[in-house]
Amino acid sequence: MTSLKKRESGPHETSRAQESTLGAFIRKARQDVSMTLRDVEEATSKEVSNGYLSQLESGKIIKPSPHVLYALSHVLSVDYEMLMHRAGYILPNASKMKGAKLAQADAFTIDNLTADEEAQLLEYLTFLRSKKKK
């Protein structure tokens, strides 16, 4: 008969696992700025109630809305994107987004149009405006 030895976790392992949760992270951030649950409620103009924050910190709520995370990031002086990441929201890479927006903007600038493209755009714009008048 094979006996399964239960792995015992020491106090350091448990605290590391707890700190990795969103709730534990928010609790630590709140304690770092010496705020009570009610202090946070008041500082967020009651956007985040002390009861909701308690449930969030205890792990009963694991995916709060981005709006709640935004309010908490300001009150607790914590990076909003990091809170979003810890809550499981996928964030696009900021540098990729910036590059994509620049490329898109560059594609639609009037300065880069050929004479033929400009004429076609003006024709299409005239068409769209004539539809609005009807």
Image (cartoon, rainbow, N blue to C red):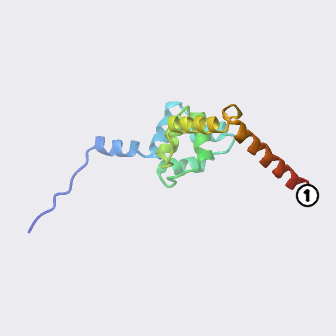
Question: In the rendered image, is residue 94 in sight?
Answer: yes
> In the image, is 99 to the left or to the right of 8?
right
Q: Nearer the viewer, residue 35 or 85?
A: 85
Q: Residue at x 62, y 40 (%)?
A: 71
Of all residues, the one furthest to the front in this rendering is 116
Query: From what the image shows, is residue 88 above or below residue 109?
Result: below
Crowding near pointer 1: few (<14 within 10 Å), some, many (20+)? Answer: few
Location of residue 106 in the rendering, given as x and y in whole percent from the top left corner: 62, 35
Residue tagged 1:
134
Q: Is residue 130 above or below residue 34?
A: below
Q: Position of residue 11 (x, y in %)?
A: 29, 43
Q: Nearer the viewer, residue 53 or 104?
A: 104
Q: Position of residue 120 (x, y in %)?
A: 74, 45
In the depicted view, which residue is nearer to us: 90 or 29? 90
In the picture provided, is 126 more to the left or to the right than 89? right
Residue 110 image position (x, y, % from top left)? 71, 34
Above or below — where is 49 with respect to 33?
below
Rendered residue at 54%/35% (across/down): 99
Amino acid identity at mark 1: Lys
- Residue at image position (78%, 49%) is 124
As drawn, the residue found furthest toward the right would be 134
Work out which residue is located at the far bottom of the displayed protein and give it. Answer: 1
For mark 1, give the secondary structure.
loop
- Where the N terminus falls, by quadrant? bottom left
